[in-house]
Amino acid sequence: MVHEETRKGPWTEQEDILLVNFVHLFGDRRWDFIAKVSGLNRTGKSCRLRWVNYLHPGLKRGKMTPQEERLVLELHSKWGNRWSRIARKLPGRTDNEIKNYWRTHMRKKAQENKRLVSSSSSFSNSSSSSTITASDSQNFPDTGKASFYDTGGPKMIDLEGKKSEQVEEGDKGYSMDDIWKDIALSDKNIIQPVCDGYSEEGYSFFCPSMASPPWEDSLDSLWKMDEEGSRLFLPSDYLFLSG
DNA sequence: AACGATCTCAACCGCCACAAC
DNA sequence: GGTTGTGGCGGTTGAGATCGT
């Protein structure tokens, strides 16, 4: 046997299928183990990332809804670049997705702002204060440093995520019900809030801390939830190839 | 239609936290 | 208590897609 190097780069459909099979067999926590036994020449990290960001059946694809956008802005103002935490409040969205969204979103804002500033030229100096918009401006305390989208939120003192978690529910301008409604309209299956409303993962489509995926008893519904058809869907006979 | 600029998003990297030993 | 292995997170990159000229 030739010891192949660890594969990198884009995943093939075959790899995806294989990974899905093994995740169903062993759960979505033992990534290193899965990486080894699956025969994928990938690292555990790579497998996890692929699953979390792309293969996970609960993922919602497509553009962010206005509600989601607002929620991202709001949560980012509270938590800064805690993408995974923010993602937990956005059912079906991944931290990577939100991170990317924020990056492009803020880039646009920064460019717009630059234009405004240069045209009015009344605000000079401003080491880097991306004035953004009125509603956003709170997100960007003038740190005078860092990239344009960096750590918008207050330099949060995390305190093990306790304090900040407590504040969050109270001062929300609107409820997650809106978002759930939105999702329910388009997805109508799979994504259900499993945990009750007020834990850290309260609004996730399932509790990440679960040892085994909750969808195991509803595999038929996997891969069918895309509303835009833009998503890779594995027909159920792809699953469990070996029976 | 061709080309360059810009945008989007999947994937990798490095660091950190935590659990097992 | 120290070491090691693994998972998770945030930052960054690069290829492909899309847009504008």
Image (cartoon, coloured by chain):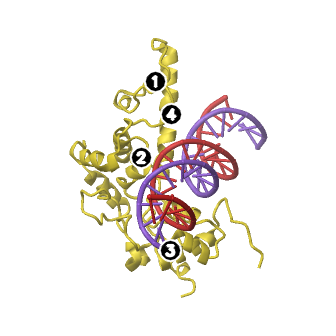
Chain colours: A yellow, B purple, C red
- The residue to which callout 4 is attached is A108
- The residue to which callout 3 is attached is A23
Percent x, y of residue A195: 28, 64
Left or right: where does residue A228 sit relative to residue A218?
Answer: right
Which of the pair A179/A172 is nearer the observer?
Answer: A172
Left or right: where does residue C16 sit relative to residue A202?
Answer: right
Q: Which mark is residue A129?
A: 1
Chain at tag 3: A
Q: Identify the image quadrant of residue C19.
A: top right
Query: Element under label 2?
Result: loop
Q: Residues within 10 Å of mark 1 (few under 14, many from 20)?
A: some
Sequence-first disc among 4 and 2: 2
- Give me the C-alpha separation between circle 4 and circle 1: 15 Å
Chain at tag 1: A
Q: Residue at x 66, y 70 (%)?
A: A41
Percent x, y of residue A223: 47, 70
Query: Element under label 1?
Result: loop
Sequence-first disc among 3 and 1: 3
Which of the pair B12/A12 is nearer the observer?
Answer: B12
Left or right: where does residue A44 sit relative to residue A125?
Answer: right
Dot 3 and dot 1 within a common chain: yes
